[in-house]
Image (cartoon, rainbow, N blue to C red):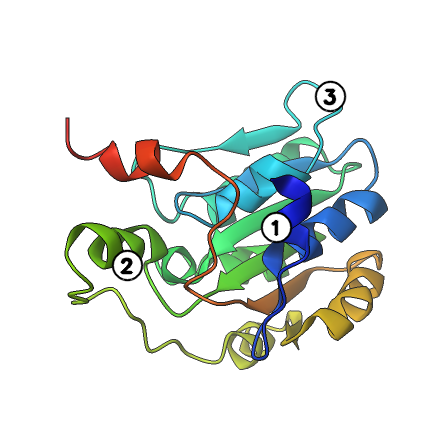
Amino acid sequence: MLNETLKRKYENGVNPAKFFNELDKVLPRNRIIIGGQGTHVLYAYDYLKVYEFGGFIAATNLGSMGFALPASIGAKLANPDKEVIAIVGDGEALMSIQALQTIKDENLNVKIIVINDGSYRVLYLKQMINKSNRIYGTVLNNPDFVKLAESFGIDAIRINNDDEILKALDEIKKNKALLIDLIVSKDDLPPTNTDMVLKMDQV
């Protein structure tokens, strides 16, 4: 299933599975991956390897949207010699975006990948499947994350299609804080046990 997901192609967006599969190849082994709450973190689970204890820190199923950005600050301060990557959903990012100011002020080389699907995707998918496509309050009108990061003095780039993945990876290798606005489809499903995910709030 992981290989099949890599073959998906979108006209207006990146295949996130392909992005994370390629990201895994360029990150150093002593990476620290920080994942927040939402569908977006499943791509990291599926495609990013963990080589060391403490190499993956996430708040999955704890309902703590907004965790990844501030947690990446703590991880970098505690491990200044390790590459720290924050995997952040777009809805989640807006709950703690002010953490960019601390990243700038403390000169922290943190890489932030915003999975920008224009939705609260867990809830959006549940509405699609469990509520007969009745969509309410789960589609977002996001700000320009690139301009927002730049307003804090942090470099940022937007990736709109698979052909731009290598450009993003080249930027990630540089010794600087960076935000990547990764444009993806809200209808893309990462490899997971979808039936169980959709039942999680029905117990």
Residue, disc 1: 5
Q: In the rendering, at what x and y percent does residue 180 appear?
A: 63, 66
Spatial separation of the CA atoms under disc 3 and disc 2: 34 Å
The image shows residue 109 at horizontal and vertical percentages of 72, 52
Q: Which residue is mark 2?
A: 124
* Badge 2 element: helix
Residue kind at label 3, given as amino acid type: Glu
Q: Is residue 196 left or right of residue 80?
A: left
Q: Residues within 10 Å of mark 1 (few under 14, many from 20)?
A: some
Instruction: Say if residue 108 shows up in the picture.
Output: no
Q: What's the residue type where badge 1 is placed?
A: Thr
Tag in front: 1 or 2: 1
> Residue flagged by tag 2: what amino acid is it?
Tyr
Indicate which label's residue lies in the foreground, 1 or 3: 1
Q: Is residue 13 left or right of residue 167?
A: left
In the picture, the disc for residue 186 is none
Residue visible at 53% across and 67% down? 184
The image shows residue 112, relative to residue 11, as above or below, that is above
User: Which residue position is annotated with label 3?
Assistant: 52
Of pointers 1 and 3, the one earlier in the residue sequence: 1
Distance of label 1 from label 2 (alpha carbons) = 20 Å
